[in-house]
Image (spheres, coloured by chain):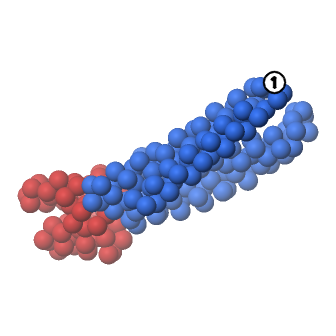
Amino acid sequence: MKKGLLIILIAIMVIVTVGLWYSNITKPTEPTDIAMIGIIVLIVGFALFMAYTRIKSAKAGLKHEDELSKKIMQKTASISFYVSLYWWLFLGYYSDKIELESHTIIGIGIAGMAVLFAGFWFYFNYRGRFND
Amino acid sequence: MTNRIKELRARYMLTQEDLAKKVGVRRETIVFLEKGKYNPSLKLAYDVSKALNSKIDEVFLFEE
């Protein structure tokens, strides 16, 4: 329960920070800015979903973590790391061809890693099949 | 590996949630076990069997 509330608190802080950043932008909003905000909203949404499931489990008197959830997290983390390497290689290759600032490329890289992680987590959590 | 968790759960009139609470795991773990999508560790297999008042080889059926 405490961890769920902590996740919600961090998500709120991220939303407030992004809101403050966006309100201080003086230059016109570019499509990349909107894309970054959209990805941040997705990531925060994922975190809030995780917090909700934690709190729901705690209220039902059920455990939130067990051997299967830890196995899913380990598999998600390892596959995400492996795929992220190729993601950064792809970004590195196309950063010469696309005119983007370095901090934008870094932001895209990090956002991509977060999306990969969330995507793989959903895939493994709902697919199962850990009979390797 | 197949199992008789659903059959034994029905015999003792336990829901998936009841069994998950007894064993100390998430309800989703019981769902995956029943569907055969997850092979449990020895400890989990033992805990599930104990919760269903059965022996491990009566709950989990190994096929060669």
Horizontal and vertical percent for residue A124?
Answer: 48, 50
Between A101 and B46, the residue placed more toward the observer is A101
Horizontal and vertical percent for residue B21?
Answer: 24, 63
Q: Quadrant of residue A15?
A: top right
Query: In which quadrant of the rendered image does the N terminus of chain A lie?
Result: bottom left
Give, as a three-letter code, the residue at label 1: Pro
Crowding at mark 1 (Cα within 10 Å: few <14, some 14-19, many 20+):
few
- Residue carrying label 1: A28
Q: Is residue B17 above or below residue A103?
A: below
Q: Which chain is blue?
A: A
Q: Is residue B46 above or below residue A55?
A: below
Q: Chain of mark 1?
A: A
Regarding residue B27, the answer to whether it shows in the image is: no
Regarding residue A99, the answer to whether it shows in the image is: yes
Label 1: element kind: loop
Q: Is residue A38 above or below residue A103?
A: above
Please name the residue shown 81% across and 42% down the image: A105
Please name the residue shown 60% across and 55% down the image: A79
- B52 sits left or right of A32 in the view: left
Horizontal and vertical percent for residue B49?
Answer: 20, 70
Q: Colour of chain B?
A: red
Horizontal and vertical percent for residue A46?
Answer: 52, 44
Q: Quadrant of residue B14?
A: bottom left
Please name the residue shown 62% across and 53% down the image: A80
Please name the residue shown 77% across and 49% down the image: A88
Q: Quadrant of residue A19?
A: top right
